[in-house]
Image (tube, coloured by chain):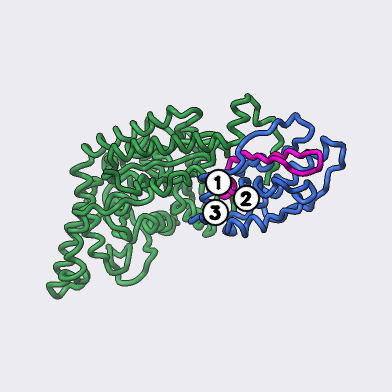
Amino acid sequence: MLKFPIYLDHNATTPCDPRVVEAMIPYFTNSFGNAASRNHPFGWQAEEAVDYAREQVAKLIGADPKEIIFTSGATEADNLAIKGVFEMYASKGNHIITCNIEHKAVLDTCKHIEKEGGEVTYLKVNPDGLIDMKELEAAIKPTTILIAIMYANNEIGTVMPMKEISALAKKKGILVFSDATQAVGKIPADVTKDGIDLMAFTAHKMYGPKGVGALYVRRKNPRVKVTAQMDGGGHERGMRSGTLNVPGIVGFGKACEICLNEMEEETKRISALRDKLETSLMKVEEAYINGSTQHRLPHVTNISFKYVEGEGLLMGFNKDIAVSSGSACTSASLEPSYVLKALGLGDDLAHSSLRFGLGRFTTEDQIDYTVEAVTKTVNKLREMSPLWEMYKEGIDMNSIEWAHH
Amino acid sequence: MAYSDKVIDHYQNPKNVGTLDKSKQNVGTGLVGAPECGDVMRLQIEVDDNGLIKDAKFKTFGCGSAIASSSLATEWLKGKTVDEAIKIDNMEIVEELHLPPVKIHCSVLAEDAIKAAVNDYRKKNGLPELKFEESVVH
C-alpha cells in the first residue's frame, strides 16, 4: 500500500533513521549531562558518548577523531572553515578560489570575505556541472591560501574531482576545503584518500537529526588551524565554543555508523531506483537531464521538461509527491536556479526543472507512482502551453519578440 | 506556498483552453510574457458583429496562479463588449483568486494579455490601437 505524501526531496533533508532516534533518547533524560562537566558522572557519561560519536563520525570519512569539530550544521562548518582559514592564514595571503555552483553558505561567506579585504575567484563550471582543472590551475596566485570546492552539488548531484583538486593544491601548498554536505554518507568521501584538509558535513542529510554538523580539520600533513568564529568556553579544541549538543551528536554518530555499514548495499538499491525513474521520465518528449550523469551521486536526478514551468508542474502532484523545482516563481526576482544557469541552461529550461532526491526509505511503488503522475502532469500542462504549441508547429521561439518584464 | 481553492480549481479544471483561428479578422490575439521570465500567456478573443466577445481561449506557460489568472480572464471576457473588456483590472483578478503579493504579476500578465488581444483585434479592423499606461508591477 502506498502511503502519501511520497518524499523525494532527500537533498533538502532526510528523516531520522529510527535506530538513530533510539540511540539519542537516553541523552535527553537520564544521561543529560554537560560533556564539559569534568567532575561528576553526569558529565563523564556525556563526554563518553560524545567521544564514541566522534569516533563513529571520523571513521565514516577516514579521519582521526581528534580532527572532528562539532558544529550546529554544515552552514556553520562552512563559515568556520572559510572565515577561520582566511583569518588564520592572513600572513600567507588573502586569495580564495571557489566555484559558482557552491551552496549559498559558501558563496555568501566568500562575499563576506571580499568585504573584509579578501580576494575570491569564482570558477565557472562546464555544462556537466564540473570545474575545469586547467582553469583552476590558472586561477592560482602566490596569495592563494584556500581552494573551496564542494564535493557534490545539492541541485544536480554532480561530484567534483576532489582527488585531482587536492593533488594540485598540495603541489602548490594550498589548503583544500570541501563542502561535502550532500556527499558524506552517500558516497565514500574520505579525507585521507581524497587529500582534503577541511570538510563540512551535517547529520540531517544522512538520516541523523537536524542542528548538528561537523567540520573536519586536518591535524597532520599539514596541521591546519582555523580561527574560532564563536568565542566562549573553548570547546572543540578552542575552535568552536558552545556546550555540545550531546543527543544530536550521539544521533550523528549513529547515523554515520549506519551509513558506513550499509552504504554499499544502499547505493546499489537506490541507484537502481533512480535509474528506473530517470529512464522512465526520459521517455517523455523534450526532457533533458541536467548535469553529468557519469560523475553523480547515486540518489539524485535533475530533469527539465521543456515548455512547462516547474512550479506549475509541481502543483499537479505536490499534494502526493514532494520534489523540488529549480524555478523560482515564488521569489520576487523570478530568477531561476543559479546552479542550472551556471550550466549554461537557458532560462526556459532552468524554469522547467525538477529535482528528485531518493532515499533510504524510497520504494519501487513510489517510483512507479511518481513516473505516472509526473508524465501525466507534463502532458496536461503542455496541452495548455503556448510554447508547446509553437514548438509543435515548428515556430522558432527565438524569432519572437518577447515582452520582457 | 498554499494556493487558494479557486486557483487550484482553475488549475485542475481550466476553462477555455485552446486556440482560435488567428487569421480571422474578428479574432484578436495577445501574447505576453517571456519564457525567460517563467511565464507566457496567450489570450484570444472572437468578436461578433455587435462588438460582443462571443468566445475567448487561452494557453499559458507558467505557474498555477498564471494558469488560473488566464482561465478566469477568459471566463470574464465572454459576453463582454470589447470596450468593457479593457476595463478589467488586474486587482479584480487578485481579489477573486486570493493571490498573494508574490503572484500579483500573474494577474498583471492577464490584464496585459487582454489589452494586447483587444489591440490586435482593433488593428485588424482598422481601428487605432489604444495606448495603455505601463503596468507598475512586473
Residue positioned 41% across, 38% down in the render: A373
Please, what is the three-letter code of the amino acid marked with disc 1? Cys
Q: Indicate the quadrant where residue A41 lies.
A: bottom left
Marker disc for residue B6: 3
Residue at numbered disc 2: B106
SS of the residue under disc 1: loop
Marker disc for residue B63: 1
Please, what is the three-letter code of the amino acid marked with disc 3? Lys
Please, what is the three-letter code of the amino acid marked with disc 2? Cys
Mark nearer the N terminus (3 vs 1) = 3
Most foreground residue, A150 or A257: A257
Q: Are marks 2 and 3 on the same chain?
A: yes
Q: Colour of chain B?
A: blue
Q: Is residue B57 magenta?
A: yes
Residue positioned 64% across, 41% down in the render: B41
Most foreground residue, A390 or A189: A390
Q: Are marks 1 and 2 on the same chain?
A: yes
Q: Is residue A153 magenta?
A: no
The chain painted green is: A
Few, some or many residues within 10 Å of mark 3 (<14, 14–19, 20+): some
Mark nearer the N terminus (1 vs 2) = 1
Q: Residue furthest left?
A: A41
SS of the residue under disc 3: helix
Q: Indicate the quadrant where residue A387 lies.
A: top right
